[in-house]
Image (tube, rainbow, N blue to C red):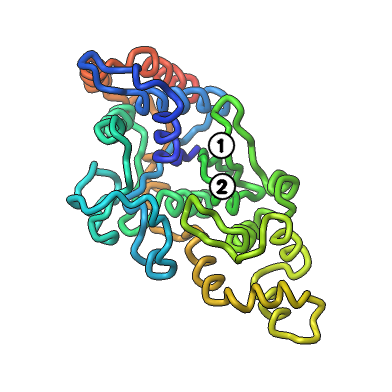
Amino acid sequence: MIFDTASMYFRAFYGLPSSMQSPHGEPVNAVRGLLDAMARLVTQYRPDALACAWDNDWRPAWRVDLLPSYKTHRVAGETPAAGPSVVGAGALAATGGLSEESPDGLTHQVPVIREVLDALGIAVIGRDGYEADDVIGSLCHQHEGRTLAVTGDRDLFQLADESTRIIYIGKGVAKHDLVDSAWVMAKYGVPASAYVDFAVLRGDPSDGLPGVKGIGDKSAAQLVDRFSDLEGMLTAASDPSSAMSPSVRSKLAGAVDYLAAAREVVRVVPDLPLPELADGRLLVDRDRIDRARLATLDARWGLGGSLERILTALSISE
């Protein structure tokens, strides 16, 4: 089971009251909400291995070079290139020191989350120049066996196949959807293998993807169904004898450069080096739990029942 860590703690922060505080009065809603979500899902699915994917670079330069609008609206401004240490971690130099806008009350919780995950013995995996999505995609592609990826990000629907399911928490952990390719087809009218092209066509304002003007969910699905992929669509658009309508032909012709760039932006990287898969670091193992360190963190931050629940869940899953 792989957790899209930032996606989960942002949702916990906004979904739980800021009155959930440490003994010193600091909000800990993101920390406790993340732990409770993890505990619930680990208890329900009982995975034998766990990983928390980390955004070493939430807005990689190579994606911005391809599509300058990518996540532009989330940029907070210039900040020092520093952050918590993670497996494969490094500075945020690739984004020029630009950090993701983070609300008051959340910033101080992120290092606490990292410390608690460390003390629980759960591997936190990040790669310089890449997002958590890329780590998740690489883990899913390279793991030999069934994989569950927990996220609130629809882009990861592209990973759903016979061995990978997406636990989509867009409506909350308690009401999560277990997404496979059939679910994607029923929801959007395209197979999961075509989700990238579908998403590129319709756009996604939350990621700064403008989409093709005049093409929404329905028309994007129809294009995928009729022409299979972007190559097929563009071939038809350039062929005067094709059955494509003049209106759609014009829309696609005016978006050729965007379509080529956006597809590479949306597609997750499948082949990052992942030595963690071979060294046993992802296996659930109570011997890795640092209980003394957890006690110190609990006393400082007041993790209470949330810490107890994740410890119980890890014991059940082992």
Can residue 318 be seen here? The reply is no
The local crowd at label 2, few if under 14, some if 14 to 19, many if 20 or more residues have their Cα within 10 Å, is: some
Seen from the viewer's position, the closer of residues 294 and 14 is 14
Work out whether 65 lies above or below 284: below
Residue positioned 30% across, 28% down in the render:
116
Seen from the viewer's position, the closer of residues 113 and 275 is 113
Q: Which residue is mark 1?
A: 170
Q: Which residue is mark 2?
A: 154
- On screen, residue 184 versus residue 284, left or right, reads right
Residue positioned 45% across, 41% down in the render:
4
- On screen, residue 75 versus residue 25, left or right, reads right
Coordinates of residue 186 in the picture (x, y in percent): 75, 46
Coordinates of residue 77 in the picture (x, y in percent): 25, 52
- On screen, residue 84 versus residue 205, left or right, reads left
Residue positioned 54% across, 54% down in the render:
204
Q: Quadrant of residue 299?
A: top left
Residue positioned 48% across, 63% down in the render:
265
Task: Measure how far apart labels 2 and 1 are at the Cα level.
Answer: 8 Å
Coordinates of residue 284 in the picture (x, y in percent): 42, 31
Coordinates of residue 193 in the picture (x, y in percent): 65, 58
For the residue labelled by badge 2, is the local secondary structure a helix, a strand or a loop?
helix
Q: Are marks 2 and 1 in contact (CB under 8 Å)?
A: yes
Q: Which amino acid is tagged 1? A: Gly
Seen from the viewer's position, the closer of residues 160 and 120 is 160
Q: Which amino acid is tagged 2? A: Arg
Q: Quadrant of residue 219?
A: bottom right
Can residue 189 be seen here? The reply is yes
Mark 2 or mark 1, earlier in chain: 2
